[in-house]
C-alpha cells in the first residue's frame, strides 16, 4: 500500500506557481523510478508507471471499476508530485519516486513484461483500467489531491489529522461497510507475553500491573471519529493508538484485547493507516455497481474527477 507516512506540509501547496501543462495527446512526462532491489533508476512514461502501480498495489481479480479507481489514485499521486517538483524520499539521486511504500509500490518494466506473459487476463484488466482513465485525476478545488489509500477499513475511514499532521478537507472519515465481509485482512489476532507488550511500548511493567500480571492497568481513553484508538493508558503512560500500532507492528489502530495467564491477545480490525480510499471498500462498491468516479468521489470528500489538461497554464515544469 501507499506509504504510512506521506510527506505532509503545514498547508496545502500554492499551486499557482506549479501548474501542469499536460495535454491528453501530448508526449507523456517521464517518471524516474528508483528500483529498490538494484538501486538503478528506471525511466518510464507516466501512463506506463501508473500501470506498474496498479499491478503492484491492487489484486488483479478485483472488479474493473475498482482497478480504475486505483489508477485514478495512482495517477493523481504522481501528477501532484511532479507538479510540485516533490523529491522527498529520493534526495541525492536523480529519481522522482521509489518503487516502495515510501511512495507507491511499482512493478518494473521487466516485472510487467512477465505479468503480461504469465497472466494475460490480469494484465488486460490493468491495461484497460489505465487506458479507460487516461488523462484523468482526482482534484479538489481544481488541484490534484493527496490521494492516500490503504488496504482494509474497520468499517470507517479516518480523518487525516488523526494519523498525519494536517487536517485536509477531502480526507474525512466516511463509512466503509463493504470491507468486513470481503477482505482477508478485516480481522487479525496477535498474541504476545505482557512483558513483551510493555517493553515494546516503553512502559515499566511493574508500574503497569495493578494487582499482578493478570490485572494490568490498561484502558482506552478516547476513540477517533473513524472508531480507532486515539489514546490509551498503560499504567501512568498515555500513548496514541497510532504509536501502539507502529511499536507493536499491528495492522490497524482499531484494536481491543483480552489477557490470559500473562499473555495479551490483541484483535485488530482492518489493515493500514485508514486515511483516504479503502481498496477493499472500492472493490465492494464496484461489486454493487458503482463506477470508478463514484468510488473516488465517495472516499475523497468533495473531490471530483477532472482532466489533467484543465490544470494547464503557461508555466513550465515536468508536466
Image (cartoon, helix red, strand yellow):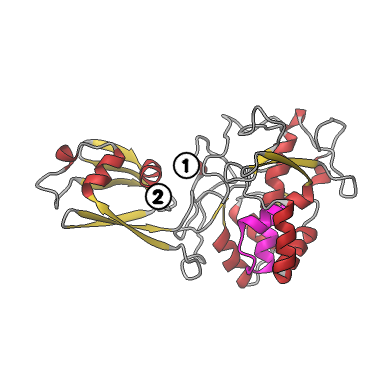
Q: Is residue 201 visible?
A: yes
Position in image of residue 28 (x %, y %)? 84, 45
Q: Quadrant of residue 51?
A: bottom right
Report helix, strand or loop for mark 1.
loop
Residue at the spot of label 1: 163
* Badge 1 or badge 2: first in the primary sequence: 1
Q: Quadrant of residue 206?
A: top left
Between 17 and 215, the one lying in front of the other is 215
The residue sitting at 86% across, 49% down in the picture is: 24
- Asked if residue 32 is positioned above or below residue 130 in the image, the reply reads above
Q: Are marks 1 and 2 in contact (CB under 8 Å)?
A: yes
Q: Is residue 136 visible?
A: no
Residue at the spot of label 2: 253
Which disc, if any, is residue 43? none
For the stretch drawn in magenta, what is the main secondary structure? helix
Position in image of residue 227 (x %, y %)? 40, 53
- Is residue 64 covered in magenta? yes
Region of the chain picked out in magenta, as a range: 50-72
Q: Quadrant of the C terminus?
A: top right
Report helix, strand or loop for mark 2.
loop
The residue sitting at 67% across, 56% down in the picture is: 54
Q: Few, some or many C-alpha atoms within 10 Å of disc 2 (few <14, some 14-19, many ≥20)?
A: many
Direction from residue 81 to residue 204 in the image, left or right: left
Amino acid at each position: 500500500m501507499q506509504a504510512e507516512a506521506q510527506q505532509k506540509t503545514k498547508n496545502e501547496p500554492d499551486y499557482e506557481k506549479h501548474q501542469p501543462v499536460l495535454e491528453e495527446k501530448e508526449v507523456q512526462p517521464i517518471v524516474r523510478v528508483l528500483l529498490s532491489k538494484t538501486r538503478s533508476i528506471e525511466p518510464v512514461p507516466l501512463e506506463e508507471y501508473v500501470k506498474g502501480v496498479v499491478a503492484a498495489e491492487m489484486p488483479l481479480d478485483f472488479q474493473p471499476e475498482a482497478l480504475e479507481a486505483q489508477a485514478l489514485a495512482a495517477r493523481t499521486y504522481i501528477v501532484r508530485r511532479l507538479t510540485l517538483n516533490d523529491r522527498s524520499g529520493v534526495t541525492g539521486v536523480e529519481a522522482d519516486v521509489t518503487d516502495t511504500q515510501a511512495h507507491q509500490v511499482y512493478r518494473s518494466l521487466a516485472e510487467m513484461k512477465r505479468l503480461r506473459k504469465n497472466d494475460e487476463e490480469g494484465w488486460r484488466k490493468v491495461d484497460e483500467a489505465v487506458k479507460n482513465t487516461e488523462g484523468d485525476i482526482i482534484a479538489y478545488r481544481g488541484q490534484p489531491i493527496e490521494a492516500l489509500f490503504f488496504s482494509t477499513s474497520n468499517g470507517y475511514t479516518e480523518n487525516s489529522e488523526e494519523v498525519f499532521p494536517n487536517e485536509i478537507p477531502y480526507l474525512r472519515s466516511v463509512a466503509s461497510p463493504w470491507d468486513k465481509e470481503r477482505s482477508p485482512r478485516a480481522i487479525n489476532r496477535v498474541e504476545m507475553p505482557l512483558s513483551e507488550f510493555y517493553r515494546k511500548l516503553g512502559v515499566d511493567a511493574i508500574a503497569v500491573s495493578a494487582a499482578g500480571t493478570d490485572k494490568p492497568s490498561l484502558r482506552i481513553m478516547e476513540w477517533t471519529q473513524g472508531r480507532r484508538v486515539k489514546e490509551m493508558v498503560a499504567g501512568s503512560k498515555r500513548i496514541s493508538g497510532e504509536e501502539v500500532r507502529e511499536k507493536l507492528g499491528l495492522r490497524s489502530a482499531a484494536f481491543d484485547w483480552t489477557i490470559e495467564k500473562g499473555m495479551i491477545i490483541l484483535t485488530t480490525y482492518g489493515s493500514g493507516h485508514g486515511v483516504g480510499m479503502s481498496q477493499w471498500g472500492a472493490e465492494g462498491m464496484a461489486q454493487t455497481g458503482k463506477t470508478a468516479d463514484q468510488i473516488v468521489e465517495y472516499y475523497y470528500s468533495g473531490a471530483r474527477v477532472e482532466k489533467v489538461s484543465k490544470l494547464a497554464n503557461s508555466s513550465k515544469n515536468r508536466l
